Amino acid sequence: MIPGMGKRIREARDAKNLTQTELANALGVQRQTVSNMERERSDPSATILKQMCLVTERSGDFFLGLQMVVKESIGIQEKETNKEDACSCPAEGRHPHNPLPLGVP
């Protein structure tokens, strides 16, 4: 089981004001399947996870809990930082933190 996935499934479902039955219908599964996923008795298949992302407009990273892990591991703070002040690298040619030419996001 993926820790916390059930809570995130419930959170995404609630944010879209969907019942378990409505989400189940949109995913093409039984209501009990959604219940089991929310109670972390089973994880969704890759196909169901993809559909759940489309239905709830959330990323796979959200459901897998990767957004928080990435933020914590690289020390991202919740507030936005000015990109120009973010590092002291020279601004010529290709930026070492972004392999695209300057000006390309």
Image: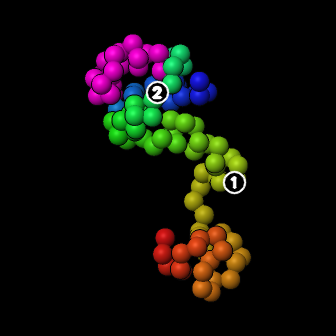
Does the segment drawn in magenta span residue 66?
A: no
N-terminal of the two: label 2 or label 1?
Answer: 2
Q: Looking at this view, is 83 or 68 the one in front?
A: 68
The residue lying at 58 percent from left, 73 percent from top is 99
Q: Are marks 2 and 1 in contact (CB under 8 Å)?
A: no
Question: Residue placed farthest to the bottom in the image?
Answer: 92
The residue lying at 30 percent from left, 25 percent from top is 28
Q: How crowded is mark 1: few (under 14 residues within 10 Å), some or many (20 or more)?
A: few
Residue 2 image point, x, y percent: 59, 28
Secondary structure beneath dot 2 equals loop
Disc 2 designates what residue? Answer: 44
Q: In this view, does 39 lie to the left or right of 29?
A: right
Q: In which quarter of the image is residue 55?
A: top left
Task: Specify start and end residues of the magenta stretch as a single range.
Answer: 17-37
| Coloration mode | rainbow
Q: In this view, does 84 lie to the left or right of 62?
A: right
